[in-house]
Image (cartoon, rainbow, N blue to C red):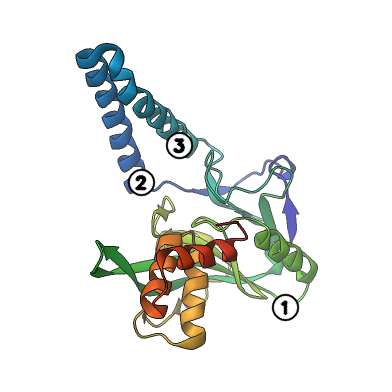
Amino acid sequence: MQLLLESELPAGRGERVYREWPWGAVAAEAAALAAGLVLSAIALSTHGALGWLVAAPSLAIAVRLALVLLARSKPSSWVLCQRPDGLALRIQPLLRGERGAAPAGDPRIVWIPSEEIAGVRAAHSVREVPSLRGESGVVDVRQVSQHLEVQLRPQGSGDSMRELRALLERSQPSSGRISLPSPDVVRIPWRVPARRASVPIERALAELGTSLAVLEPRRAPARSWSRLRGRELDDLVRELVDSGDEAGASNVLRLRHGWTRRRARSFVQALLGRAA
């Protein structure tokens, strides 16, 4: 296994690329972009100079969304690249300005030669997290996630795995970041809240299976924030933070521990290594 900069990944032949293309998010961003432009035009045409008070922030939001849409369509916005001699994994999201993007100079690619891979599998999980509606309303939101796991062979990747774990620990969590659930597994978010790969995981596994072993899928039991206790509840909070769902983690802390919004937010920010 090697950790590489973007420029250090050589062009390969016979490669199959899996991209990040969350159609739902793109549609929402496109709708918001169109709404921002329409609102700006109406404000300017009906209120003249005062219309800039509305048009300026609307145009700024529209430009920001346009940059996100352009980033999503870039050829380099891929999550996994299969080659005859191994797999290349993107460590962090590439979207412009996305929280969690790797600092400049840090490796962005994990290269795993085929001889170090024992197999690939799907990992399925279901969790229920609270969503606060107003001051008293609580609605359970069911989150279904799919990850693609790369199972490594016992030998040959120890130093690189430690380096990768250190890199992940010093970068900001995000929903598109790979993770290391165990010392010999690299997990790729495939279908998670707010993000999904361009093809179903079943198709990806069938294609990866032409050169790699496909292992039995892993199915975790469904978990609900209201029934977990002790370490399991702590793990859920940490998992929500690591996946970029700060609001969900804060809601769990407020409802289960009776914390104020300020205290829960401060705790989540501390987990992220940032000042509240």
Q: Which residue is drawn at 55% across and 61% down?
A: 269
- Residue 84 tag number: none
Work out how far the residue at label 3 is from the one at label 1, CA to CA, in angstroms.
Answer: 40 Å
**In the rendering, at what x and y percent does residue 6 appear?**
68, 43
Which quadrant does the C terminus fall into? bottom right
**Closer-to-camera residue (103/27):** 103
- Residue 154 tag number: 1
Vertical arrangement, residue 156 with respect to residue 39, above or below: below
Q: Identify the amino acid type marked 3.
A: Val
Q: Is disc 3 in contact with disc 1, using a CB cutoff of under 8 Å?
A: no
Q: Is disc 1 in contact with disc 2, using a CB cutoff of under 8 Å?
A: no
Work out how far the residue at label 1 is from the one at label 2, CA to CA, in angstroms.
Answer: 38 Å
Vertical arrangement, residue 147 with respect to residue 172, above or below: below
| Disc 3 target residue | 68
First along the sequence among labels 3 and 1? 3
Q: Nearer the viewer, mark 1 or mark 2?
A: 2
Vertical arrangement, residue 148 with respect to residue 274, above or below: below
**In the rendering, at what x and y percent does residue 83 appear?**
62, 52
| Secondary structure at numbered mark 1 | loop
Q: Residue at x 57, y 51 (%)?
A: 100
| Disc 2 target residue | 25
Q: Identify the amino acid type marked 1.
A: Pro
